[in-house]
Amino acid sequence: MGRLIIVSNRVPSPRERTQPAGGLAVGLRDAVRGGSSMWFGWSGNQAEGEGDPEPSFDTVDGVTYATIDLTESQHEGFYQNFSNGILWPLFHYRVGLMNYSRRDWQIYLEVNALFARTLVPLLKPDDVVWVHDYHLFPLGQALRDLGVTTRIGFFLHIPVPPWSLVRSLPGAELLLEDLQAYDLIGVQTDEDADNLNQSFRVNGLTERARAFPIGIDPHEFRAQAEAGVGSDEAERLRASLRGAALVLGVDRLDYSKGLPERFRGYEALIARYPEHRGKVTFLQVAPVSRGDVEEYRLLRRQLDELTGRINGAYAEFDWTPIRYITRPIARDILAGFYRMADVALITPLRDGMNLVAKEYIAAQDGESPGVLVLSHFAGAAPELDEAVLVNPYDADEIADALHQALTMGLDERKARWRKLDAEVRRTTAGSWARDFLQALDEAQATPATPAA
Ligand code: ADP
Ligand code: G6P
């Protein structure tokens, strides 16, 4: 068996305790542990000179991290504009936020070709290449163009809307054609697989998408949560709550996460159920993400204002309804906070999976577990259907769900949590990677059948 070559734009820094937030790097890091593998991607740094960059290498625990720098204009056109200003909103069903430009599409293709050129000399004939996420749709084709014949799989971490939306992207058919270079395409849910296969079908292409829902490492996360709950930070948080129930939200600061809607839902709780005033605190941790993209800056301003307004209206001199943090928090401390939280409030308007929901379940103490309030539109919802499920657009529904969660009896909390925990243990990061790679192995042996 050859090496596994992971390719993604974002590569975790293997030596740092506080990682940038994001499900791809977390899920994959849990999945690649222990194997002989290389992880190729963007360094996060800016290239100095012109010409193709030289990769830098770092090997930690058997995984070699090979990364390249991008120039400022590559970073802007490829990452900020095309990946995060066009593809991200489109695939999260927010066509109105898509800011299309042909020039950015061109730079996106050029950076994908650059990834291919720099990766090819590092490949060996029996390697298996596994490409990740929307930044790299055309990479498989770019590698094939350079003569790569090994198996190449692709996994898309974000949702896939129906063709009627995808076609809003000028030239969407070209992206779909490029995707044909992959031997297998994994997506998070059956709905995503149906939508992508529909897009292939109506364009006369071969259906190659299958659902492989990503998971976490629940044992490791539980251990982190158990340790984290005894940390100084957790002690300080507990003391500061002075007996109030803790409602926790943890998300990158992203418009797909439904944060303004969530804040309004919490406001509706304290407005309509005054018995919770002074008895509950909502802590939202939302590290700034993609801060150079306009929509993200606007969202940040909106949340600053909303937090100020709600706190101004409802706070007492000894109680603050919302605590809002935009810095990242180290994972082990965060795990302790999850365990302490009476309720996790996770209400994306659309989300590929949402690993935070799974982490929250894994972190609970089974003797007195907390309650997960989860959006129907998280990719995790079909698996985690024992959560209190809500429509995130309805502030009153969020308020009712929070009230239900905060007043739920121990027996019901335990019964729901046991089923949720069984789900989180069923598909882990490790089993997800194994299942995908096995299917990739079989996909090459059986050539895909053309669409009827
Ligand atoms: P996304 O991939 O859209 O960011 P996920 O919920 O799937 O959403 O994954 C987010 C990952 O980032 C989780 O593993 C979570 O623990 C981590 N994370 C989120 N917020 C923070 C934070 N404030 N500090 C550190 N890690 C975070
Ligand atoms: C999501 C995407 C990932 C991305 C992560 C963090 O999980 O699916 O591809 O890495 O968000 O976003 P960033 O732009 O910081 O890489």
Image (cartoon, rainbow, N blue to C red):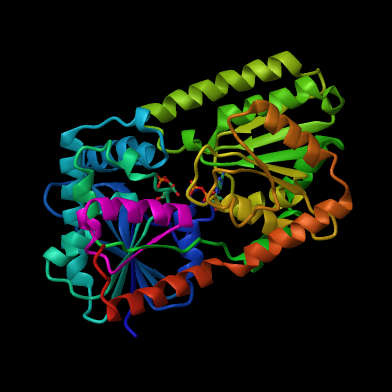
Q: Is residue 332 visible?
A: no
Give, as a single range, the part of the protein colored magenta: 177-205
Along the horizontal axis of the image, is 355 left or right of 5?
right
- Image x and y of residue 423, in percent: 65, 63
| Rendered position, 394 above or below 229 | above
Q: Quadrant of residue 322?
A: top right
Q: Quadrant of residue 13?
A: bottom left
- Residue at figure coordinates x 26%, y 82% from the top left: 126
- Image x and y of residue 47, in percent: 22, 47
| Rendered position, 162 above or below 398 | below
Q: Is residue 142 visible?
A: yes
Q: Is residue 426 magenta?
A: no
Q: Quadrant of residue 259?
A: top right
Along the horizontal axis of the image, is 94 left or right of 213?
left
Q: Quadrant of the N terminus?
A: bottom left
Q: Is residue 184 magenta?
A: yes
Furthest residue in direction front, as rendered: 452
Q: How many circles with numbers are drawn on the protein? A: 0
| Rendered position, 244 above or below 202 | above
Name the foreground residue: 281 vs 414.
414
- Residue at figure coordinates x 21%, y 37% from the top left: 170
- Image x and y of residue 407, in percent: 85, 39
- Residue at figure coordinates x 39%, y 74% from the top left: 439
